[in-house]
Image (cartoon, rainbow, N blue to C red):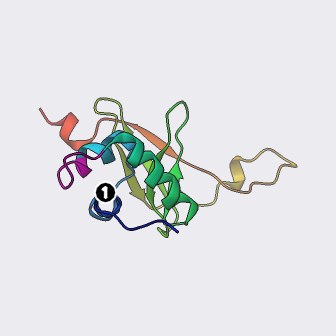
């Protein structure tokens, strides 16, 4: 069992306060606002521990390193900003995709990723 430390608490708080998937370096930057000497190795160890415990889940987008978000969210998809590389949750789903599935195939799950510019990057 891991000890609760200021660093671990800061990392958990970052995920609690940020409503979108985060990469380890985003967690490091935000966590240093609470614990100035937070290191990337601690961030990776803590993320791995939080995934193992089921508190975080990985968000894997094609061709990118995983990001992480709190477990327990309803089914949703993601929007990836091509300018700032941040990823955002999209609540909702296009629905039943069985009509797109080839004949004889059995659909088990799906992931929809939208790409473009987030509101901040798209602003004039």
> How many circles with numbers are drawn on the protein?
1
SS category of the residue bearing label 1: helix
Place of residue 42 in the rendered image (x, y in percent of width and height, measured from the top left) = 39, 48
Q: Going by the image, does 33 lie left or right of 104? A: left
Which residue occupies the foreground of this view, 46 or 30?
46
Residue at the image point whose x is 30% and y is 44% from the top: 28
Place of residue 105 in the rendered image (x, y in percent of width and height, measured from the top left) = 83, 49
Place of residue 22 in the rendered image (x, y in percent of width and height, measured from the top left) = 37, 48
Query: Which residue is tagged 1?
Result: 7
Residue 93 visible in the displayed image: no
Residue 51 visible in the displayed image: yes
Residue at the image point whose x is 63% and y is 60% from the top: 96
Q: Going by the image, does 101 lie left or right of 54? A: right
Quarter-of-image position of residue 118 = top left
Which residue occupies the foreground of this view, 60 or 28?
28
The stretch in magenta equals: 30-38
- The residue at the far left in this view is 124
Quarter-of-image position of residue 40 = top left
Does residue 36 belong to the magenta stretch? yes
Does residue 101 belong to the magenta stretch? no
Q: Main secondary structure of the magenta part?
A: loop
Picture layout, residue 85 above or below residue 96: above
How many residues crowd around disc 1 within 10 Å: few (fewer than 14), some, or many (20 or more)? many
Q: Is the C terminus in the top left, top right, bottom left or bottom right quadrant?
A: top left
Which residue occupies the foreground of this view, 48 or 2?
2
Residue at the image point whose x is 17% and y is 51% from the top: 33
Place of residue 21 in the rendered image (x, y in percent of width and height, measured from the top left) = 39, 51
Which residue occupies the foreground of this view, 33 or 41?
41
- The residue at the far right in this view is 104
């Amino acid at each position: 069992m891991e000890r609760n430390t200021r660093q671990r608490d800061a990392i958990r708080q970052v995920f609690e306060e940020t409503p979108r998937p985060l990469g380890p370096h985003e967690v490091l930057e935000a966590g240093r606002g609470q614990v100035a000497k937070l290191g990337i190795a601690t961030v990776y160890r803590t993320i791995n521990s939080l995934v193992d415990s089921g508190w975080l889940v990985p968000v894997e987008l094609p061709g990118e390193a995983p990001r992480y978000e709190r477990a327990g969210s309803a089914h949703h998809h993601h929007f990836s900003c091509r300018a700032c590389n941040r990823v955002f949750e999209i609540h909702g789903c296009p629905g039943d995709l069985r009509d797109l599935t080839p004949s004889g195939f059995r659909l088990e799950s799906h992931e929809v990723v939208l790409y473009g510019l987030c509101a901040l990057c798209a602003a004039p």
